[in-house]
Amino acid sequence: MLFCLTIYIQNSRSFLFLLNIKQHLSKKIKKFLIKNYFI
């Protein structure tokens, strides 16, 4: 039970980490697109 819980917690952390990276990248891409379109 505890073992499963620790695995679940690790997975959720990595998931959140990936989610943060995805959001960060999407923000950068949006900025990049906006710069390119409005020049």
Image (tube, rainbow, N blue to C red):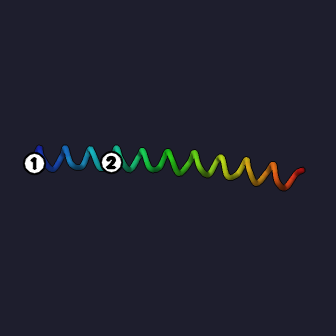
Residue situated in front as seen by the camera: 38 or 9 = 38
Tell me the kind of residue under disc 2: Ser
Which residue of the protein is positioned furthest toward the right in this rendering?
Answer: 39
Q: Which residue sits at x=56%, y=48%?
A: 23
- 19 relative position to 1: left or right: right
Give how far across and how far down residue 10 sits, in percent. Answer: 27, 45
Residues packed near mark 2 inside 10 Å, few (<14), some (14 to 19) or many (20 plus):
few
Residue placed farthest to the left in the image? Answer: 1
* Image position, residue 22 (x, y; %): 53, 51
Which of these two is toward me, 36 or 9?
36
Q: In which quarter of the image is residue 33?
A: bottom right
- The label on residue 12 is 2
Instruction: Indicate the amino acid at tag 1.
Output: Met
- Rendered image: mark on residue 32: none
Residue at screen point 57% across, 45% down? 24
Local packing at callout 1 (Cα closer than 10 Å; few below 14, some 14-19, many 20+) is few
Front residue of 36/13: it is: 36
Q: Distance between the residues labelled 1 and 2?
A: 16 Å
| Residue at the image point whose x is 26% and y is 44% from the top | 9
Residue in the image at 11% along x and 44% along y: 2
Q: Earlier in the sequence, mark 1 or mark 2?
A: 1
**Disc 2, SS:** helix
Judge from the rendering whether residue 31 lies leftward or rightward of residue 10; answer left or right: right
Residue under numbered circle 1: 1
Number of numbered labels in the structure image: 2
Residue 34: percent from left, percent from top: 79, 51
Which element type, helix, strand or loop, lies under badge 1?
loop
- Taking the image as shown, residue 7 lies to the left or right of residue 37, namely left
Instruction: Give coordinates of residue 30: x percent, y percent.
Output: 70, 51
